[in-house]
Image: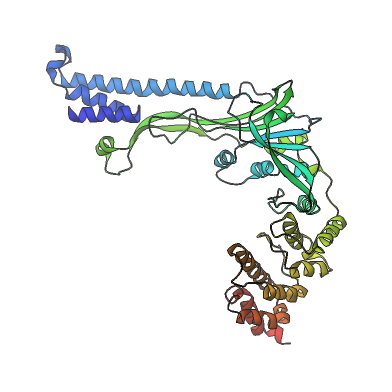
Amino acid sequence: MILIIILFVNCVIYGFGIGFFFVALSFLISVKPTAWPAWFKSVRTRFAVAVCLTIAIAIIFPAHENAARHRRREEARRADVLRTERLENVHQLAILYNPSSLQRQTGGIMDGNYQELERWQSLLLSHAVDGVLIGRDAEFGGNLDPATSVIRYRIGRRPWCEPIQLKDRSGRSDLDALARLASGTCLISEKDNLGDADTVVAVEFLPNDGPRSFHRHDEDVTANRIALYQRDGVMFRLVSQETHVGGSDWFVPVVYGSSGIGFVPSMIFGGGADFLTMNNRDPIPPDIHTRFLQWGLSAEDQIKLSEDVMRQTAKLVLDRSDIPEDSAVNDFLGAYLFNKAWNDPDRSLAAAIIRNPNVTRFPFDGPSTKTPGDLARPIAERMLATDLSPSMTSAKLSSSRYVVQRMAGLIQLLPACASLSARDLIEQADHDAARHVLVASAVRMVELDLRDARCRK
């Protein structure tokens, strides 16, 4: 009887599952025969009834639950209406989304949808809209509250712009946007309310339909939704809604435990009751990129800066001696070096960027081609000239060490024999105790070139 009580408590804690059926069987078979009517005292009769009851519940209960799940999935997309026409007169655009939810439904990968939402800065810098309001995702299926707090971003002129992460759809630095920031066209943030927006794009997610009283590895209903709202008086009117749903159905009951000590012990000491699932479906990822293009909310179709304008911008800001380390100008010059100046036949601008001690933010996604041979000495000069004095702040010293190591990595990408033109500078850096470890890859490149028979000619 104690075992039955323990099993019953376990069943209540972990919910319906095989625990329920096991308790039913145990109770019907183990209770003393005097407690039953005469016709039910036979063990065979009680066992047959218990088995029939177990089978009935195992079939009826999942069927009833699955029907309810299907209804909830249909209800989630019943009100869908898709608008594909271009939006007009969009001045203040609000974008509501939750990055963690988007990553969770895309397997933790920063896919094109995530990048699309993270590129809202380009809408401002290309003047596609006047302001962008960013907030957390709205409740799935809920109404928008104009009093919701958001952060509003707008364009403003300042001597120096703060750095921001700007990527194009290939994942590389967005040079057009960075060039505008470098010229003093800055993104300015301030607190605001959702009610100041005239258009709202909400990317909503439904991870499940509520908490569970027992362990579950499946979801009843999973869904994502792209909803478009436009101002209608003081409220917002839904003009487009696209929902993709997924989920799973219950199949057969199972028991599992984390202790790994067997079936009955896991029922007594821990584990849980659950159902094996079938028809498991993930919702189709939201196609945010296509919707933004259709609605005219993508900066992709804006006029790009010409090569001459971008080069002139780089020259103008490079001539300034007071470039702050933590600025968009620093980001622009580092990105411009690897994306444009690197392949320019005239290496003078690339060499000037490399030699400038104020340029310290060289991007991780470096050049896709080998380092030009005629940049070997400018790179080695910067590697040797970068200040690594111990009196610097830890943040400044860390930044300087990164520059030295980055330069050494560029030496390693030189074509055969090119490192020898800067051998004297590289060896000086190697003899410096503060740089010895940081320039190891450059020293290795010199050693390889010295052994190369082609370099002895």
* Total count of labels: 0
Q: Nearer the viewer, residue 434 or 222?
A: 434
Q: Is residue 258 left or right of residue 155?
A: left
The figure's colour scheme reads: rainbow
Quadrant of the rendered structure where residue 369 is? Answer: bottom right
Across and down, in percent, residue 321 comes to 78, 64
Across and down, in percent, residue 138 comes to 60, 30
Q: Measured along the vertical axis of the image, is residue 446 above or below residue 30?
A: below
The residue drawn where x is 64% and y is 79% is 429
Q: Is residue 39 left or right of residue 68?
A: left
The residue drawn where x is 63% and y is 30% is 148
Q: Nearer the viewer, residue 350 or 248?
A: 350
Q: Is residue 142 visible?
A: yes
Across and down, in percent, residue 400 comes to 64, 67
Q: Residue furthest front?
A: 391
Quadrant of the rendered structure where residue 319 is? Answer: bottom right
Q: Measured along the vertical axis of the image, is residue 129 above or below residue 174?
A: above
Q: Quadrant of the C terminus?
A: bottom right
Q: Measured along the vertical axis of the image, is residue 188 above or below residue 200?
A: below
Q: Measured along the vertical axis of the image, is residue 17 above or below residue 399?
A: above
Q: Is residue 38 left or right of residue 92?
A: left
Q: Nearer the viewer, residue 308 or 413?
A: 308
Q: Nearer the viewer, residue 225 or 59?
A: 225
